[in-house]
Image (spheres, grey):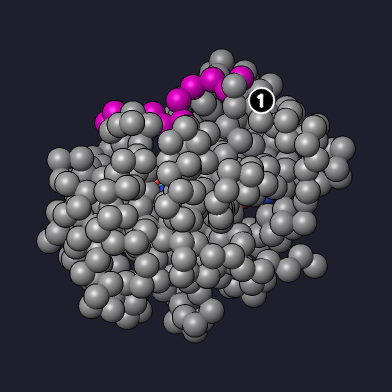
Amino acid sequence: MTHVGTTLLGDALTVSRLGYGAMGLSDTYGPADQDESLATLHHAVDRGVTLIDTADLYGFGGNEELVGRLLATRRDEVTLATKFGITVGEGGLAGMGTRGDAAYVREACEASLKRLGVEVIDLYYMHRRQVSVPIEETVGAMAELVEEGKVRHLGLSEVTADELRGAHRVHPIAAVQSEWSLWSRDVERAVVPTAAELGVGFVPYSPLGRGFLTGTLSDPSTFSGDWRGGLARFTGDAYERNRAAVATIAEIASALTVTSAQVALAWLRQHAVALGLAAVPIPGTRRAARVDENIASLDVTLDAEQVSRLDQVAEAVVGPRSDHSDPDWVSDTRE
Ligand SMILES: NC(=O)c1ccc[n+]([C@@H]2O[C@H](COP(=O)([O-])OP(=O)(O)OC[C@H]3O[C@@H](n4cnc5c(N)ncnc54)[C@H](OP(=O)(O)O)[C@@H]3O)[C@@H](O)[C@H]2O)c1
């Protein structure tokens, strides 16, 4: 059985080599049964996964409450990561905006602590930047939460390299959490090298491409009813072309008698090491068996030829990684 083991994010935060993302436990990618979800969370911790990732946005607070049910009995075994900064209006997700002013940071943290039922958050991320607020103000407010003992380490999601530098001058940043996978590699241009230079850890989100890279989404009806059904990469002609683009992953998986999910995670791990930084992906799944499958990726080693073939996958992918109507929503457009 694979030993998960630990690694260091930044210079002081020890976490499991693979984390767990809880977003999908709030119906993001199809309906999630809450009892099964809680059992899956317990299973991840049983197996040695310590980094559990949630956000105040997921399930509009419900995801933090679910993680809080895990923490009620296992707080000491978990490195708890949550996020603030995305607001929802009356239109729910359709009315999403951002806030990063100091008063909001404090208010959001208090609300998360309450829903999670804890006194301190181990890793507190800015989820999205409100671009009209200087990053120094937002991170300054986050640093005050550290001083007050409400937060232990700071993280940033979807920041540019310059924003990361500015933030890191205010307070050490333990981790950047941004999308990074075989088919979404924009962060490699500037954010990854900057994180490596500053000694900031990386937490790749959607490391399985929201399921696409696992090769299990061969029937569009399995995702057309959830959020992915509206994403450019999953729709129409792009869906077919992207299926062809990622076929290499399945070929390599078959040659190694492992799964495509394991190849996608192994590539990310090896690639991050080659680029000089610690990366702890946080794949999400509703199912305990897939937690085991994803953990077993830690035992998969790709040879140079396989890595080289996988390095070419992203070039053939069609469609933007984010379809959000706000052009500043992800970091690449602000670079
Ligand atoms: N900071 C941000 O802005 C941001 C944005 C997105 C996500 N995140 C975080 O990153 C985490 C992971 O990202 P994600 O959930 O978007 O995408 P992901 O981990 O790339 O993919 C999740 C999807 O893959 C499926 N899956 C998982 N393991 C599998 C396996 N071994 N074989 C086949 N299918 C598998 C899951 O389905 P089943 O549930 O059916 O297994 C789910 O539909 C989230 O939970 C969240 O914590 C952060």
**Residue 326 shown in magenta:** yes
Left/right placement of residue 310 relative to residue 209 reads right
Name, please, the residue furthest toward the left: 103
Magenta residues span 316-327
Q: Decide: is 212 above or below 114.
A: above
Work out whether residue 208 or residue 335 is closer to the camera in this orientation and state it. Answer: 335
Q: Quadrant of the C terminus?
A: top left
Q: At x 49% / y 49%, what residue is drawn? A: 196
Relative image position of residue 235 (x, y in whole percent): 52, 23
Task: Determine crowd level at label 1: few under 14, some 14-19, many 20+ residues with C-alpha closer than 10 A.
Answer: some
Q: Quadrant of residue 64?
A: bottom left
Left/right placement of residue 40 relative to residue 69 reads right
Question: Is any atom of residue 60 visible in this view?
Answer: no
Name, please, the residue furthest toward the top: 237
Q: Quadrant of residue 113?
A: bottom left
Relative image position of residue 130 (x, y in whole percent): 21, 44
Q: Quadrant of the N terminus?
A: bottom right
Q: Which residue is mark 1?
A: 312
